[in-house]
Image (cartoon, helix red, strand yellow):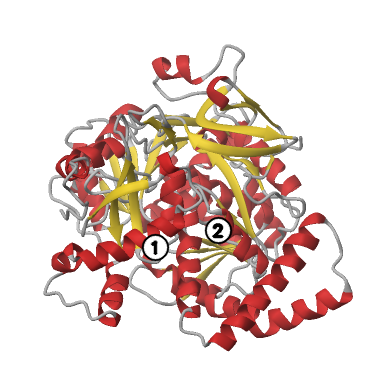
Amino acid sequence: MADFHFARYMFTQANKYGTKSAIRYREIGSNTWQKKSWDDFAEEIDTIAHALAQMGLKESDKAGQFSQNMAENLVVDFALYSNRAVVIPIYATSSVDQVSYILNDSQLEFLFVGEQQQYDVACEARKKAPTLKHIIAFDKHIRFSEADKEISIYYSDLLTLGANKPKHDVVEKRRSEANDNDLGAILYTSGTTGNPKGVMLMHSGFHHAMVNHKQKLTSLSDKDVSIAFLPLTHVFERLWCYLCLYLGIEIAINLRPTDIQATIKEIRPTCMCAVPRFWEKVYIGIKENLSHYSAFMLGVVTWAIATGKKHNVDYLRNGRKPHWWLRTKYRIADKFIFSKVKLTLGIENGNMFPTAGAALSDHITLFFRSIGIPICYGYGLTESYATVCCFDYTHYEIGSLGTIMPGIEVKIGEDNEILLKGETVCKGYYNRPDVNAVAFTEDGFFRTGDAGYIKGNTLYLTERIKDLFKTSNGKYIAPQQIETLLTTDKYIEQVAVIGDQRNYVTAIIVPNIPALKEYAQKNSITYQTEEELLENPKIYECIEKRINKLQANMAHFEQIKKFTLIKKGFAIETGELTNTLKLRRAIIQQHYAKAIDAMYEPSTHGFVVK
């Protein structure tokens, strides 16, 4: 493999692309997009690298990034790599306890923070983490606390400190000696149980991940434009952005997750990674719009989707050239239906939309593929530098996770567990020899905790082993499959399936209250409060009918028999969700223990509201 290291590569790219835009971003409080050229990006990386060295950053030192998505995040990453230091991203929504745990576990001395909220949390966390010596604030409007003023500095002042390159010889030596054996990052998993574990990602893994993705994703080029939408703390977005920079793809940084719809329409990206829930909401929105169409227009749309399926899925997916009449019909369907949908969403220029992080319903994948939106579904973990497998351009199988990436070995172990080995599989967890001892098999394969099977080179997922539970009747239930199915309904926002050691399956459901209010208005259902709305038997009956329809093809023992509607959704702040929005089932069951017990009382119908 050619000489490559992220300590040096951004400067190689700057020499190649010069004034071409590398990053597009908006300052906090501004609606105007600004561009940072490759030359400016590389210069800022070098400046921050010198400033950090001047402040005492040493090789192998650890520095945290506790921030929402900002252009500075990427600058700091490569400034740290220039010093052979280690980056530790922390989710912007993390609590004081979560931050103090990571600070203490990693013994980091430098912490970059985004806005006032992260700064205040960092100051509180520092009381329990004495190793923290420097807090660098990205937002120039942050108000420093008196107690932490001496260790706080603005990012703009850091730029001034490094402007004259005071540590030129030191930084250049570190940059030239950086190699694949260096530890690059520690990413703390937001585990559903217990304390987070720090996944050690080596530069060798970054190197192989870049080469493997370039080999697999051949349609990507420096003509593409991507949006950084998911948190950069998440391995999916982080490695995707690294790949974009590796390929010369411009990245638009989306600061606020709630702004993403507007951002997409402004940027008109050709690619963007997202979790399935994003596409589920897009799908629900499209279906909702269709519900207002006349019978004639619905017929036209149904014809168009069927045509799209035949053209894109039956023919192109299988490597077959559509005949002239099918091509003609597809052009008509695309011009009058599909292109308008994509234009409205802002994705008419779509090249590839990687999607992973949870299960995506097959019918949603089929829908978007049929109308020409190139979702690239896949599977990966923090421990595998993101991608294990993903859809190919042709011959992908809907219902699968796609084909296995080059350079990674996958096999099925006991209990059908998916096992991994390769250069893009982590070496273990930081400071956790106890966990490392059980995380790998005797022959060196990493245990994913997911169950599945392989056909040829295609991987299929069946369930998350840790989430799998057994009813008192001895039937195994995979709750994620049921939850994924139910959240495709426009009236359902979140679901937690219950049933471990119980005699039937139940669920705690967070409904889409605005949609239910609209339903109540159309059906003359009166109520004074939202609680009264959710308690109404007609509302319960509405959702019950929709659930029954969704699970009609499921085995009887898998079907939800009763459910509880709750007004307040599961949240990170309450501990019910991880920072990556996965359910913490034990916490949810603890918080709703009375409601759950009530659903197993013979006389209870189920619409208990908490």
Q: Is residue 168 above or below residue 442?
A: below
Residue 14 appears in view: yes
Judged left or right of residue 24, residue 213 is: right
Q: CA distance from mark 2 to mark 1?
A: 24 Å
Q: Secondary structure at mark 2?
A: helix
Answer above or below: position of 529 versus 147.
below
In this orientation, does residue 83 appear? no
Image quarter hosting the N terminus: top right
Image x and y of residue 81, in percent = 53, 40
In the depicted structure, whether residue 25 falls above or below residue 295: above
Q: Which amino acid, by three-letter code, is at mark 1? A: Pro
Measuring from the top left, give residue 21's x and y in whole percent.
Answer: 60, 67
Q: Residues within 10 Å of mark 1 (few under 14, many from 20)?
A: some
User: In the image, what residue occupies the spot 75% across and 66% down?
Assistant: 310
State which tag comes first along the sequence, 2 or 1.
2
Left or right relative to 571: residue 368: right
Marks 2 and 1 in Cβ contact (< 8 Å): no
Q: Which residue is mark 1?
A: 257
Q: Nearer the viewer, residue 392 or 504?
A: 504
Which structural element holds mark 1?
Answer: helix
Amino acid under disc 2:
Phe
Position of 119 with respect to 86 (left or right) is: left
**Closest to the observer, 453 or 431:** 453
In depth, the one of 61 and 383 nearer the eye is 383
Which residue is depicted at the point 27% across and 35% down? Answer: 586
User: Which residue does the image show at 29% across and 71% down from the upper left?
Assistant: 516
Q: Nearer the viewer, mark 2 or mark 1?
A: 1
Residue 596, how many percent across, how many down? 21, 42
Q: Which is nearer the eye, 151 or 394?
A: 394
Q: Which mark is residue 383?
A: none
According to the picture, the residue beneath numbered tag 2 turns out to be 41
